Amino acid sequence: MSQQSAASKPSLSGVRIKARKGAVKAQAKHEPTVFRDQLYKHLETVPEGDFESFAVKLVQAGAQLEFLKYADGLFEIILVGGLIQPGGSYVEDGAPVSPFTIFNAKEPVQVEEIKKYIDVLNKLIRRYKYLQKPLEEVSLPTLLQYINRWSPAQRDKLSIAVGLLISQGLASASCLTSLTKDHLVKNDVSINVLSLIFRAYLVDQSMEHLSAALKRGGIKDLLPFFPPGKQDGKALEEHFKKAGLPQVAEWWSKKLYAGIKSELVKNLTEICEREDTTDQPELIVVIQIVAAIKSHQEENPLPDVELIACIWQGLMASVDWSARPDQIEGLALREVGKFAPVLEPFCNGPKTEVSLINVVQVYCYEDTRIIKAFPQILKVLYNKDCISDQAIIYWHQKGSKPQGRQHFLKSTETLVKFLQEQETDSEEE
């Protein structure tokens, strides 16, 4: 018994016990200052303005320091010059500003100057690809929510840097949602920062490229970046035009109109389909449809040219085209005759009338079943006072669309000749 108790107990000497991830993460929160000081030692030896050497030193440091573990601190050091504590203020331990940070960029702030810093970041992230995720998901959203705490010049530098990072695909536009926080929106901070981000982005990229980036980042609406009293389309367009970004204002208008047009077409189609199931007189149906269009136009006004195209699309989308092939053209003419009283109140000028002809042209071009009925459709619209003889003649001479142009011009020669002769006879009288 005594011999057993005297025997040495088994030990785990030489076995490395792996700490839990949670414990390591918790411990890491108290060590970023050590990481910062070690990183500074790598960067302090580089002469100011030697961006190639900064890139080399950062890549070398990544082989020795735990960049993934301290990714937040790494980007805080590079982007704003030091470690940030909750609330957005710097960690106060007497540490100097980072030898390499975007805040060291020359003033007045220029996009070309900030590009030099972003090129260094680009090289670093290409070498350590795992850094991209913490940059776009944690670091940028965190720093942007504190952007009001820095000076105007520092704010401009960070804004331009964010625009370049997104344009070069190093970060997602999803980080911009941090700018919709109330404390940033109310004093125009958000929209001014967003304008700088867009300006930097558009230096090398197109508006279409920016639009796609915003869509991928889940930024569906720009109005939340404006103060509550300015969250309307007019204020948005005025702001971006004054900011020297007319392409953003134009893109927004098209986007807004696209939504309004889609809604109008859908509503018109539903109204027409619903009215087809009732026994109401045709005149009552026309009055109700016209009233619905005018109501929609008062709430969400569209240019006349856009409106007439939406009305045509909505009306024709409600037609049941399941007739025999030899009856399709006759069906099309009957439906156009039925819907013409709806179109007529909104054909209020030569420009709108020519636009309607072009809408019909493209519609017939895309639906080849009724392509031969085009001249007869124009006759119906002319007899119903939707389009004038001058509009048809102008369209034939120089106003037609390229889709199927030669076919449609040839097929309407007889009609146009008749209208020209009729116009000549009336002038002689």
Image (tube, helix red, strand yellow):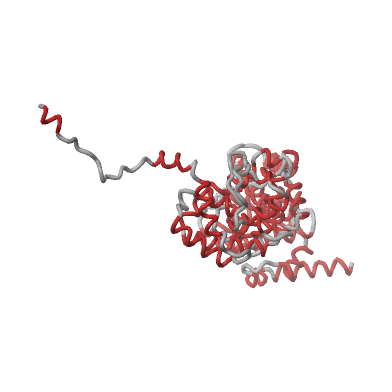
- The image quadrant that residue 161 belongs to is bottom right
Instruction: For the N terminus, give its image quadrant.
Output: top left
| Vertical relation: 161 (above or below) 231 | below
Q: Give percent across and percent down for residue 57.
A: 52, 62
Q: Residue furthest top?
A: 1
Q: Residue furthest right?
A: 429
Q: Give percent across and percent down for residue 403.
A: 62, 67
Q: Give percent across and percent down for residue 141.
A: 58, 46
Left or right, residue 381 beside residue 31:
right
Instruction: For the C terminus, give its image quadrant.
Output: bottom right
| Vertical relation: 396 (above or below) 105 | below
Q: Is residue 366 visible?
A: yes
Residue located at (64% from left, 59% from top) = 201
Q: Nearer the viewer, residue 200 or 4?
A: 4
Left or right, residue 13 beside residue 153:
left
Q: Give percent across and percent down for residue 244.
A: 75, 58
Q: How many marks?
A: 0
Q: Is residue 80 visible?
A: no
Q: Nearer the viewer, residue 375 or 14?
A: 14
- The image quadrant that residue 289 belongs to is top right
| Vertical relation: 153 (above or below) 413 | above
